[in-house]
């Protein structure tokens, strides 16, 4: 048996998944909290039926919001998930 280094999320996605015509949008208010927001997004995106979710992050701190959006986008790309991140400081 050969070992592979695929992450659990990309392994689950490798199974045939049906992407919705209108993906689910989840708004995260106060998304500048790096640990909470990133873990929440990872948990949701790891469910095969929710792999194409759009995460709409909002926070009053532009600096924190940019950092979280960047990290979360990187995580999605690394795991080859179709979900995407949008961010705004406009409440």
Image: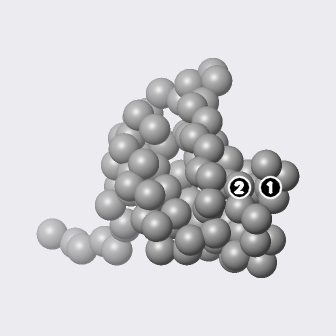
Check the image and name the residue furthest to the top.
21
Tag 2 secondary structure? strand
Occupied quadrant, residue 47: top left
Image height of 73 relative to 83, above or below: below
Q: What is the distance, in whole Å, between disc 2 and disc 1 at their CAs?
A: 5 Å
Is any part of residue 66 visible from this angle? no
Q: Earlier in the sequence, mark 2 or mark 1?
A: 2
The reply to whether callout 2 and callout 1 are in contact (CB within 8 Å) is: yes
Residue 31: x percent and y percent?
Answer: 61, 62
Quadrant for the N terminus in the image = bottom left
Tell me if residue 31 comes above or below residue 82 in the rendering: below
Q: x%, y% of residue 81?
A: 53, 52
Q: Residue furthest left?
A: 1
Q: At 81% across and 59% down in the image, what residue appears?
A: 89
From the viewer's perspective, tell me whether residue 50 is left or right of residue 3: right
At 70% across and 76% down in the image, what residue appears?
64
Q: What residue is shown with label 1?
A: 88
**Which labelled disc corresponds to residue 58?**
2
Circle 1 — which element?
Answer: strand
Q: Which mark is residue 25?
A: none
Local crowd size for mark 2, using a 10 Å CA cut-off: few (<14), some (14–19), many (≥20): many
Picture residue at 80% right of the left edge, 55% below the top: 88
Q: Is residue 60 visible?
A: yes
């Amino acid at each position: 048996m050969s070992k592979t280094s695929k992450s659990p999320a990309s392994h689950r996605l490798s199974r045939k998944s049906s992407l919705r015509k209108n993906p689910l949008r989840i708004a995260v208010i106060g998304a500048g909290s790096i640990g909470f927001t990133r873990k929440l997004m990872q948990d949701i995106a790891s469910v095969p039926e929710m792999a194409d979710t759009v995460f709409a992050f909002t926070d009053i701190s532009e600096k924190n919001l940019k950092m979280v959006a960047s990290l979360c986008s990187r995580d999605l790309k690394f795991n080859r998930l179709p979900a995407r991140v949008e961010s705004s400081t406009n409440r």
